[in-house]
Image (tube, helix red, strand yellow):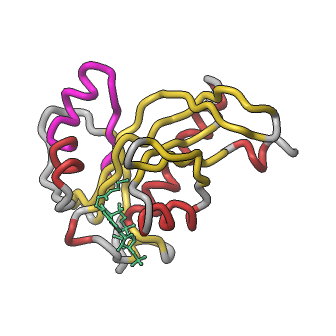
Amino acid sequence: MTGRVKVAVLDSPKIPFLETGDPDIDSFFKSAWEEKLYCNNVTYILHLDEIPAGFASVSMKSLYVELPQGTKSYPALLLARLGVDKRFRGKHIFDGMRGGEYLLKYIVGLTQKVGERVGCRLVILDTDPGKLELYYRNFGFESSGPKGKKIGMYYDICETLCDT
Ligand SMILES: CC(C)(COP(=O)(O)OP(=O)(O)OC[C@H]1O[C@@H](n2cnc3c(N)ncnc32)[C@H](O)[C@@H]1OP(=O)(O)O)[C@@H](O)C(=O)NCCC(=O)NCCS
């Protein structure tokens, strides 16, 4: 699959049509403008040839975790929701990457940029144990432990940068 890939911030109340098939993710996406308006979450939309194909919503948080520099609370960017439209799921959209992977890479890059101006070391998320946990683990996330029925995960952007 080839085409023009673009990620842009949701900057108007007009929510584009996009359906992941997951009720929680879809209902969150419908409220993405209110989330932005009240400074809770900013949503980034993935476009393929101008067609909305996925989204990632993020906010600031922190995570208490054991890292080589100590066990304490580290500043983090929370990936509150991630979704790819059913029509584009599992498709390699760019450079062998699927839509979710492309958005994850974008969010890691965003965290690095934010981290240059405001301390921010981790990307964190909560997911279901099992297949999705493995999906994030393959990307480079590690488990931070159970969170009710979910599992907390983190990606340390400083892991390589801190050694240089
Ligand atoms: C997760 C998601 C963003 C990944 O999109 P993608 O990069 O295009 O990749 P895929 O859809 O092929 O999914 C990657 C793998 O995760 C699995 N997967 C996706 N959603 C899943 C779910 N809700 N539960 C269990 N497994 C799931 C897929 O079967 C696939 O497995 P495979 O690699 O063995 O084929 C997309 O599948 C999605 O929007 N899912 C529904 C919403 C969701 O669950 N979001 C994540 C919340 S933490």
Location of the C terminus (image quadrant): top right
- Relative placement, left or right, of 115 versus 6 is right
- Relative placement, left or right, of 100 versus 112 is left
**Viewer-proximal residue among 102 and 60:** 60
Which residue is located at x 15 percent, y 44 percent?
Answer: 27
Give the image quadrant in which the ligand numbered 1 is located: bottom left
Residue reaching furthest top?
Answer: 38
**Viewer-proximal residue among 156 and 147:** 147
Question: Which percent across, then down, holds residue 22?
Answer: 20, 57
**Viewer-proximal residue among 126 and 123:** 126
Whether residue 115 is in magenta: the answer is no
Location of the N terminus (image quadrant): bottom left
Q: Which residues are magenta?
A: 29-45
Residue reaching furthest bottom?
Answer: 1
Q: Is residue 47 visible?
A: no
Question: Which percent across, then down, holds residue 139?
Answer: 56, 63
Q: How many marks?
A: 0
Question: Which percent across, then down, holds residue 146?
Answer: 50, 46
Above/below status of 90 relative to 45: below
Which residue is located at x 47 percent, y 50 percent?
Answer: 151
Which residue is located at x 35 percent, y 51 percent?
Answer: 82
Above/below status of 128 relative to 71: below
Whether residue 37 is in magenta: the answer is yes
Which residue is located at x 40 percent, y 37 percent?
Answer: 58
Q: Is residue 35 visible?
A: yes
Question: Which percent across, then down, holds residue 94?
Answer: 44, 71
